[in-house]
Amino acid sequence: MSQGILTQLVAGLSKIDGIDLIEQEGPHTAGQQAATYEIQGELRREEQSWHYQARLVDLASGRIESVAEISSDAAEGSAQLLQTRLAARAGYAFADRLNSLQLKGQAARDPAGDVAIRQAIASINQTTQERFATALAILEKSLSADPDNVDLQVALAALRLRGVQMAWYDPARSLEAEEDARVLLERALKARPNAVAILGAYCRFLTVTNQFSESLVACARVLTANPWDGTALFHLGMTHVQLGRFADALAVFSQADRFDTPEVSRWTWMLGAGWASLLMDRNEDAVTWLERSVAITPASGRAYMLLAAAYQNLGRTADAKNAFAKAMEIRPQSTVRNISLPARNTSDIYLRARQSINRTLAQLGLPNETP
């Protein structure tokens, strides 16, 4: 188990730009490249759980830093999946810490801004429009008091994009929210051009606003800084979906699920995998993915809409009606016209598959226009 984790950890870390990975045992000799940091991992088994402690050692000072302490249920999956998830969780934490070290000398994080961000995140753990409004107010007030705070700029831009994705703005305000997010992210990128969090937010912005050629490049760039970033993988998969590359999208979403990092975003790639499966008419697979997603969060109701379509395709009419009712309860203004993502720059293959889903939802009672 330890060797499997090490192999995957090394493979991932070797992909990170700006870092040379050295296998070095004992003191280095003349002519051998000297390492700056040493990565250490300790694996132990306790009853039905695996525990992995990841540490980073500054070789100049001897300072030892605990980067992550990870636990996984031994029954969570196969040995291969456990190795992948433990390596991914450790690797994600290492990549995040190494990126922070590379950004030394740039503006430090402001504790007050961090508190506001945590409060905003706490208010939307169970994503609803009301909690979204609360989070938005928290971040707007905090940024007004500290307009140069990069972390607040990124958090607010990300939240505005969530509102766009969830269709929580009216059409005119949605365009304004996109522009506000773009301005905030460009300011943040100017201040910290190599920060993974900002690169990730920009990847998301390009995907949500249907700038697919640019988003493929931006999301790939995030993965050169953190190969285990499931959020970047999700947006990469979303781009593939809307370009009509459903099999590629499903492969990317499935990879994100194997990594399961960061855990806070796991509902997203399950939603994506369910959607891609449904678009390929793999309804049983779609149900499995989508049920897992809604068990974590119902989001905007879109997952329930897709779940209703998959149930209906399988002839599970009662389940389809129940899922559809839940979707309409969460998003009562849904119509055939507004339930889908914007169509600009999308492929004809995707549009035809999307229309098929919409016809199924219309059979279940989704109106063409808002009453």
Image: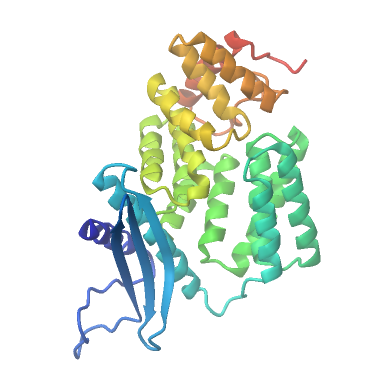
Identify the residue at image location x=68%, y=13%.
367
The location of residue 363, given as percent across then percent down, is: 58, 8
Please identify the residue farthest to the front as the structure is shown: 47
Instruction: Please state if 193 lies on the left or on the right of 124 as rendered.
Output: left
- What residue occupies the far bottom of the structure in this picture? 30
Side (left or right) of 327 relative to 314: right
Query: How many numbered marks, from 0 up?
Result: 0
Give the residue displayed 54% in from the left and 59% down from the top. Answer: 197
Q: Quadrant of the C terminus?
A: top right
Q: Establish if 217 lies above or below 111.
A: above
Q: What residue is at 76 percent from the left and 33 percent from the top?
A: 170
Task: Tell me if residue 302 can be seen.
Answer: yes
Question: From this viewpoint, is residue 187 visible?
Answer: no
* Quarter of the rendering containing residue 115: bottom right
Q: Nearer the viewer, residue 322 or 258?
A: 322
Q: Identify the residue shown where x is 47% and y is 11%.
A: 316
- Considering only vertical position in the picture, is 57 above or below 31? above
Residue 97: x and y in percent read 46, 69
Q: Quadrant of residue 207?
A: top right
Q: Position of residue 305 (x, y in %)?
A: 57, 23
Q: Nearer the viewer, residue 269 or 233?
A: 269
In this rendering, would 230 be left or right of 183? left
- Residue 369 in the image: above or below residue 64: above
Q: Position of residue 118 (x, y in %)?
A: 65, 58
Front-lying residue, 214 or 301: 301
Q: Quick one: quadrant of the N terminus?
A: bottom left
